[in-house]
Structure formats: C-alpha cells, structure tokens
Image (cartoon, rainbow, N blue to C red):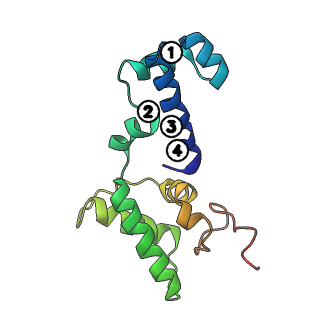
Amino acid sequence: MNAAQNEDEVHMQEILEKVEDGGAIRTLAKQYDRSRSTIRGRRDGATDAHSAQIKAQKLSPLQEQLLADYLLEEEALGRALSLAEIRDVAHEIIDPGGDDNTIGRHWTVTYIAHCDVLIHSIIKHTPWTYPRPLDCGC
C-alpha cells in the first residue's frame, strides 16, 4: 500500500469512527468527499479496494518485495535485468520450472511503476516500454 492509499485508509477509519459515534453518512461523505455507498459498504464490513485485489495479484506482497530486493541487488552489482528478464524471474517465482508463462508482456512495466523502491532505480529497459527517470543523470 503506497502513501496515498494509506492516507485514504486513515481518512476512511476516521469516517467509520464518526459514523459509529452517530455521525450522518451523508454529511461525512460531503465533508470527506467520499461516496455514501462506499462508506455504507465499509461500515457493513466490506474491505478496501486495495485489500480486495491482493488475491488477484500475480505475486503476493512478500514475493513482490523479494523480487524488488533481488532486482536492486543485481543492479548494484552492475547486472541490471531487462524487462523480459524481470518477467522471467517473476514467472519462476510463480511457477518454478513451469512452461506456461502466466505473466503478460506489460506486467513488468506496471510492477516497476507501482513499486516505490524500483521506480527511482535505473533499470535496463526497452525505450518504448519504460521511460527513463528524469533524474538519471543521462
């Protein structure tokens, strides 16, 4: 969960506490710029969008962190992996020794974009799929 999602969740917890204390959902929805149905759903036990999507992710959060650590270590050793190589490593994490590649061609770009520790790292890439960071010193 990134900082913006964390802040949203903190606000939602504040809203739910106020609802529990008798606050009007309509008033709180306007005050916090949230949907009334979202507040009602969360009050009734629905999970936040981020937590609900975790089961559908290719890699678990722990596996994503291990992959990020491995990529940063390889980069520090001067062996930065290409996007295709990162996808192959991720596939081996999901299905060791498997033949059916379940990770799509653009998964790597999305993974790097949402991984806070990798987004600022300069990883060898194909120019048409992943733009260089502006602060790379190029």
Q: Which of marks 4 and 2 is nearer the N terminus?
A: 4
Left/right of residue 135 with respect to residue 44 in the rendered view: right
Pointers 3 and 2 in contact (C-beta within 8 Å): yes
Residue marked by disc 1 = 37
Residue marked by disc 4 = 6
- Which amino acid type is marked by label 3? Glu
Q: In which quarter of the image is residue 93?
A: bottom left
In this rendering, which labeled residue sits more in front, label 1 or label 4? 4
**Which residue is painted at 46% across and 74% down in the image?**
71
- Crowding at dot 4, Cα within 10 Å, few <14 / some 14-19 / many 20+, comes out as few
75 versus 30 height, above or below: below
**Which residue is painted at 45% across and 68% down in the image?**
68
Q: Which of marks 1 and 2 is nearer the N terminus?
A: 1
Q: Distance between the residues labelled 3 and 1?
A: 16 Å
Q: Which mark is residue 48?
A: 2
Pointers 4 and 3 in contact (C-beta within 8 Å): yes
Q: Is mark 4 on a helix, strand or loop?
A: helix
In this rendering, which labeled residue sits more in front, label 3 or label 1? 3
Q: How far apart are marks 1 and 4 (CA)?
A: 20 Å
Residue marked by disc 3 = 9
Q: What element carries label 1?
A: helix
Left/right of residue 81 with respect to residue 136 in the rendered view: left
Query: Closer to the camera, 90 or 133?
Result: 133
- Which amino acid type is marked by label 4? Asn
**Which residue is painted at 41% across and 75% down in the image?**
70
